[in-house]
Image (cartoon, rainbow, N blue to C red):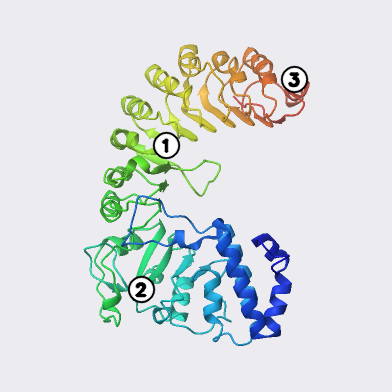
């Protein structure tokens, strides 16, 4: 082993050999676990200690996530331990391999061959239990029940009363919802246990209330003295809300997570104006990434719908965050509110920008056009018009005319739902600024022959273009359009159908 299994990759290749040795004798198993421990200690990428929250010595250094390498190494240790004959006797050697950390996930459940143990009484060997399980509250409950940890108390906020993890999970399971979930870690230090939620997804008001309203628990905890005063959300890293559209719920959630200093990402899917109530309370917004909506190709994840009031409020808080995704519906917004919102979208971190139901007035076109050339991280840009609003040459020039340098990261560009007949030249003439464009959609724009030929000529500079969608444009028969595209862009797959108008 010392000669041929010096790295984790070597050990993976020798996995069947390690299992065989562990099954031969307990002495052989001890040698295997000692060797795996030395491999873990010699590889910085397998350092489990940096993933454990330390509430007493908290610093500004962000916590490391449990990585695939951690999980694969744990699998290697567990499959070897499965073959051990005297599991209870070698329990400490097994835990030493992963620095006393147990990983439980949807794909790596707590294995039945692990001996019955009470980690609270094994402080020297067991440091933490990780639960990277989404959508399965029952799996977390079963894992903690197996480890006899349902009696451990937790606090939702620092000032809230302690409640048992078992009671909390029981109430979570009682709500019939498959959209809500969390991942977490149970840490052991100096005889105390503390449960932290690292990732939280909420998709219904009922589950949200379990985090924002007091929960009356009648069962006394036999481990109250072990409970830390810290909030279980103190080390929250990822927070997501889906299909919640209650302003008071967002306000209450903002109060609960506002002091989560390690919060790195906030995500909203299918929500509404109320998201402002939450975002306005976040204290570490300058280091927090914000994702609003998802790509509209995913029908199950609609974009956020805003009214004029909601757009104006959101515009006031957006500059405080590192916005990476912005996918919103603006059908119910007035022109002034859209202008104010668009003027706040100037983030260098922005990767996806999708505006649905937008009416590109001259003011909106000017403001948005001033930002586009500076959004160097942008990989997706989608503009969906409302009721085939007319897009004049002046608006197109204001929108795309300011682009004077390459946008190398732009992979997908969509402009659809406008009447832009004879007005596309400001866009088509600048396609060479999108050298890595892979998907271009110019659908339902009432394009004319001049627009079409100008587009084909400009697209010769985009060698990576794979899909060109010209659906619902009056360009003639499919055979004729396909023939012209094949001549100019033989590598491109065309999507086209004759407009019925």
| Image vertical order of residue 352 relative to residue 123, above or below | above
Q: In the rendering, at what x and y percent does residue 295 appear?
A: 52, 41
Task: Give the secondary structure at mark 1.
Answer: strand
The single residue placed furthest to the front in the displayed view is 3
Q: Nearer the viewer, residue 172 or 331?
A: 172
Among the two numbered marks 2 and 1 on one chain, the one whose residue lies closer to the N terminus: 2
Q: Would residue 462 be visible to someone looking at this image? A: yes
Q: Nearer the viewer, mark 3 or mark 1?
A: 3
Give residue 12's mark.
Answer: none
- Residue at image mark 2: 165
Relative to residue 355, is residue 258 drawn left or right? left
Q: Are marks 3 and 1 in contact (CB under 8 Å)?
A: no
**In what quadrant of the picture does the C terminus appear?**
top right
- Residue at image mark 3: 488
- Residue at image mark 1: 329
Identify the residue at horizontal 33%, vertical 63% (top origin): 232
Q: Dividing the picture into quarters, in which one does residue 440 lie?
A: top right
Identify the residue at horizontal 40%, vertical 82% (top origin): 121
Q: In the rendering, at what x and y percent does residue 461 appear?
A: 67, 20
CA separation in Å, label 3 and label 1: 36 Å
Callout count: 3
Q: In the rendering, at what x and y percent does residue 371 appear?
A: 43, 23
Task: Give the secondary structure at mark 3.
Answer: helix
The single residue placed furthest to the left in the displayed view is 159
Q: Nearer the viewer, mark 3 or mark 2?
A: 2
Identify the residue at horizontal 42%, vertical 81% (top origin): 148
Identify the residue at horizontal 47%, vertical 83% (top origin): 117
| Image vertical order of residue 374 relative to residue 40, above or below | above
How dense is the environment of label 2, judged by Cα within 10 Å: few (below 14), some, or many (20 and up)? some
Q: Nearer the viewer, mark 2 or mark 1?
A: 2
How dense is the environment of label 3, judged by Cα within 10 Å: few (below 14), some, or many (20 and up)? some
């Amino acid at each position: 082993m010392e000669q041929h299994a010096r790295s984790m990759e070597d050990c993976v290749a020798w996995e069947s050999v390690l299992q065989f040795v562990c099954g031969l004798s307990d002495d052989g198993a001890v040698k295997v676990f000692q060797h795996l421990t030395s491999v873990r200690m010699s590889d910085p990428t397998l350092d489990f200690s940096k993933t454990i929250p330390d509430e007493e010595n908290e610093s500004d250094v962000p916590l490391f996530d449990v990585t695939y390498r951690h999980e694969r190494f744990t699998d290697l240790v567990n499959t070897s331990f499965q073959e051990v004959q005297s599991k209870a006797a070698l329990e400490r050697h097994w835990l030493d391999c992963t620095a006393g950390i147990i990983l439980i996930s949807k794909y790596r459940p707590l294995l039945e061959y692990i001996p019955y143990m009470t980690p609270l009484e094994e402080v020297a060997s067991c440091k933490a239990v990780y639960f990277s399980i989404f959508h399965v509250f029952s799996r977390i409950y079963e894992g903690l029940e197996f480890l006899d940890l349902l009696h451990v108390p937790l606090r939702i906020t620092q000032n809230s009363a302690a409640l048992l993890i078992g009671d909390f999970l029981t109430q979570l399971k009682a709500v019939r919802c498959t959209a809500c979930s969390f991942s977490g870690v149970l840490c052991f230090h100096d005889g105390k246990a503390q449960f932290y939620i690292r990732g939280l997804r909420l998709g219904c008001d009922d589950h949200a209330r379990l985090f924002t309203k007091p929960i009356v628990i009648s069962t006394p905890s036999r481990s109250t003295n072990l409970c830390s005063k810290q909030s279980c959300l103190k080390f929250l890293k990822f927070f997501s809300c889906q299909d919640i559209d209650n302003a008071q719920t967002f306000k209450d959630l903002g109060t609960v997570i506002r002091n989560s200093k390690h919060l790195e990402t906030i995500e909203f899917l299918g929500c509404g104006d109320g998201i402002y109530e939450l975002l306005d309370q976040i204290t570490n917004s300058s280091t927090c990434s914000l994702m609003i909506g998802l790509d509209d190709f995913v029908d199950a994840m609609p974009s956020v719908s805003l009214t004029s009031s909601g757009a104006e409020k959101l515009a006031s808080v957006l500059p405080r965050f590192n916005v990476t995704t912005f996918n919103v519906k603006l059908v119910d917004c007035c022109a002034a509110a859209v202008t104010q919102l668009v003027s706040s979208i100037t983030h260098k971190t922005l990767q996806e920008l999708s505006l649905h139901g937008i009416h590109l007035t001259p003011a909106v076109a000017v403001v948005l056009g001033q930002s586009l050339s500076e959004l160097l991280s942008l990989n997706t840009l989608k503009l969906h018009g409302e009721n085939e609003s007319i897009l004049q040459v002046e608006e197109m020039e204001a929108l795309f005319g300011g682009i004077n340098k390459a946008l190398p990261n732009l992979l997908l560009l969509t402009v659809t739902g406008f009447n832009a007949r004879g007005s596309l030249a400001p866009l088509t003439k600048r396609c060479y600024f999108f050298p890595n464009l892979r998907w271009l959609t110019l659908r339902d724009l009432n394009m004319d022959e001049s627009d079409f030929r100008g587009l084909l000529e400009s697209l010769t500079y985009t060698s990576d273009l794979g899909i060109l969608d010209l659906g619902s444009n009056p360009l003639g028969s499919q055979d004729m359009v396909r023939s012209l595209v094949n001549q100019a862009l033989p590598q491109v797959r065309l999507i086209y159908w004759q407009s019925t108008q």
